[in-house]
Amino acid sequence: MTSAIAAKLIDALEAAAGREAGGQTALVSVTIDMLSADAETSAEAKLVRKTRTLVFMSAEARSASGERVATASSVHKVLSA
């Protein structure tokens, strides 16, 4: 269960980082904090900070009832713009 939540968070972080960078990125680091395990979750990522070479992101996974079940933060290297 927790691996599925982690995968959703990482997918959301990577997709959002690519959009924010306007091109390809490589995941440099990710930290995930699990608060509970819930089968039905959705993940949403947002930009925290962007430099010329790095994109910093955060994300939350929420249950169907809206309860936060996990948080994540990541750093992505910009490969192309």
Image (tube, rainbow, N blue to C red):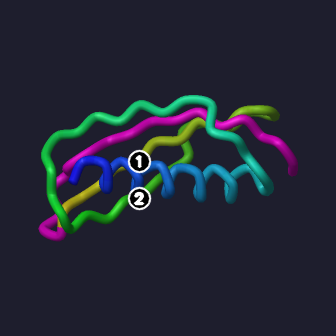
Which numbered tag is attached to residue 10? none
Callout 1: SS: strand
What is the CA distance from the residue labelled 2 to the residue labelled 1? Answer: 5 Å
**Residue that badge 1 annotates:** 59
The residue carrying pointer 2 sits among few (fewer than 14), some (14 to 19) or many (20 or more) residues within 10 Å by Cα, namely: some
In the rendered image, which quarter contains the N terminus? bottom left
Amino acid under disc 1 = Ala
Helix, strand or loop under label 2: strand
Provide residue 13's location: percent of width, then percent of height. 52, 50
User: Label 1 crowding class (10 Å Cα cut-off): few <14, some 14-19, many 20+?
Assistant: many
Question: Residue drawn at (59%, 36%), measured in percent from left and top?
Answer: 56
Picture quadrant where residue 50 is located:
top right
Q: Position of residue 14 (x, y in %)?
A: 58, 51
Instruction: Residue at the far right: name it.
Output: 81
Pointer 2 and pointer 1: residues touching (CB < 8 Å)?
yes
Depth check, front residue: 38 or 21 = 38
Residue span colored magenta: 64-81
Instruction: Inspect the image, locate mark 2, and give the three-letter code of the amino acid beneath it.
Output: Glu
Residue 71 lies in quadrant: top left
Q: Position of residue 41 (x, y in %)?
A: 25, 64
Q: Which residue is mark 2?
A: 44
Residue at 81 percent across and 34 percent down: it is: 52
**Which residue is pictured at 62% across the width and 31% down the height?**
28
Q: How many marks?
A: 2
Give the residue at x 50% y 56%: 11
User: Residue 74: x percent and y percent?
Assistant: 52, 35
Q: Is residue 70 magenta?
A: yes
- Asked whether, in this view, residue 81 is left or right of residue 21, the answer is right
Residue toward you, 39 or 63: 39
Of mark 2 and mark 1, the one earlier in the sequence is: 2
Q: Mostly what secondary structure, the magenta segment?
A: strand
